[in-house]
Each structure stands twice: as structure tokens, then as C-alpha cells.
Image (tube, rainbow, N blue to C red):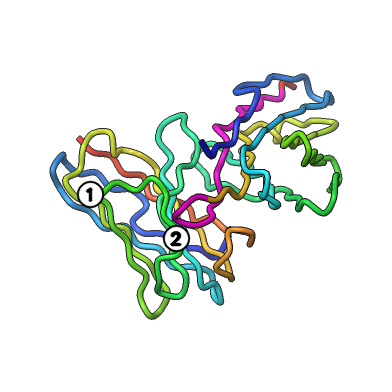
Amino acid sequence: DSGVTQTPKHLITATGQRVTLRCSPRSGDLSVYWYQQSLDQGLQFLIQYYNGEERAKGNILERFSAQQFPDLHSELNLSSLELGDSALYFCASSWGGSSYNEQFFGPGTRLTVL
Amino acid sequence: GENVEQHPSTLSVQEGDSAVIKCTYSDSASNYFPWYKQELGKRPQLIIDIRSNVGEKKDQRIAVTLNKTAKHFSLHITETQPEDSAVYFCAAVLRNDSGSRLTFGEGTQLTVNP
């Protein structure tokens, strides 16, 4: 157990809908990272927040947005969902704001868009 | 562009043999190279990492080597066991206009046959 929690574990929804994925970092960690892992694919970096502020951005679609709250938990919002958005979404956390810090991954949320 | 290339995509070895996975990266300034192991349906877990001030690091049956001049690094697993079967991802910190981020290779499916 990495200490990073994600909810829900599974999510099944329809095209055009909007969902929110939640992540709580390890105690003491200030950074949260979001990754997308499609079937048989690697981990695609979406976005990083550090202490409530956006720190780095990857290939995140405009339909996706994220935020980090004062208690450091983070939410990833996916809207106007398409079939291709079906994937495993991982969040990871680290103590510092640099990508050079070890990242600890949560168990992931499996999103299925029908 | 900024990327990390990983080879091979699949690797099958006999129990007790060695396995080697290689990665190349594009950003010559990158100085942090972690390796993650992901078992089926599970979260990625860090197994070893190396920073650019050293050329090799070992942890029991696992070792990583780094050649900064050639911009490549490799994972070596000796005396493989069936429980080593998993997908292995290399990663490197790459920079772009929107900050530095951990960029993953496409993964290597390692199968250790008893």
C-alpha cells in the first residue's frame, strides 16, 4: 500500500457524460500527479499540482480539468466523455514539487465509457 | 520531440536467466531515471532509480546502468523468478515549455517461464 488513495475504483458511464475522479496523496506529500493509461499503453502524464497550484502540464485534453484543494486532495474532471477516454487513471504523489522526487502511485480508477 | 524509447516491448526468459531492458531518452539535461514494475491490474511501483551522478546502481538481483553520453539506460534482472513477470516501465524527467515531468517508456512485458 503506497498511502495514496483513489476513488472510485471503477466507473462506468456513457458518452457525453462528466465524471470526477478523486485522489488523496500520502500524508506529508504536497504534489499530486495525474496519469492516463489506456489498454496496452504506457503512462501518459496529464497534469501536476503542487501545494494547490498547477506546476506542470502534459497532454491533457481541454475537456479534462483538475484542481488541488487546501487539504491537498485532488480531483480530475473529465467531461463530454468519448469512447477513447476509457482507461486507467492513476494519481501519484511526492513530497516536493520537482519531478525528480520519487512518485508513489495510487491503485487507479478504471473508467469505462460505453 | 521529448520522449523515452523502450525496448523490447516483450521479453520471455527461462527462470534463472537474466533479463535486460533498454531505454533511450532525448533530453540531455535529464538526471533522474526511475524504473517501475506494474503487475496485472495493479499500480506501478518503483523498483530502482538512478541519478546522473552515478553510472550504475544495484539492489539485490536488480541493477540499472546509465550512459549519459549516449543518453541510454538499462535495467538488468539476474536469476529471474516467475514473480518477476510483469510490465516494466523506464522513465526520465524531460522538460518542455510547461515544466518538467516524468516521461515513461511504452513498457516491456516480461514473462519468466518456470
Residue shown at the point (23%, 38%) measured from the top left: A113
Q: Where does the magenta region start and end?
A: B96-112
In-image side of B62 versus A25 (left or right): right
Mark linked to residue A63: 1
Residue B70: x percent and y percent? 76, 34
Circle 1 Cα neighbour tier, 10 Å, few/some/many (<14 / 14–19 / ≥20): few
One can see residue A1 in this view: no
- Please state which of residues A111 and B5 is positioned toward the viewer in this rendering: B5
One can see residue A101 in this view: yes
Chain under callout 2: A
In-image side of B67 versus A31 (left or right): right
Q: On the image, which quarter does residue A21 sit in?
A: bottom left
In-image side of A113 versus B60 (left or right): left
Residue shown at the point (13%, 43%) measured from the top left: A16
Residue A45: x percent and y percent? 45, 48
Q: What's the amino acid at mark 2?
A: Gln
- Please state which of residues B59 and B84 is positioned toward the viewer in this rendering: B59
For label 1, the SS is loop
Q: Is residue A48 magenta?
A: no
For label 2, the SS is strand
Q: Is residue B104 magenta?
A: yes
Image quadrant for the C terminus of chain B?
A: top right
Residue B57: x percent and y percent? 84, 47
Judged by its main secondary structure, the magenta piece is strand
Labels 1 and 2 in the same subunit = yes
Chain under callout 1: A
Mark linked to residue A48: 2
Circle 2 Cα neighbour tier, 10 Å, few/some/many (<14 / 14–19 / ≥20): many
Q: What's the amino acid at mark 1?
A: Arg
Placement of A41 over or under A46, stated as above or below:
above
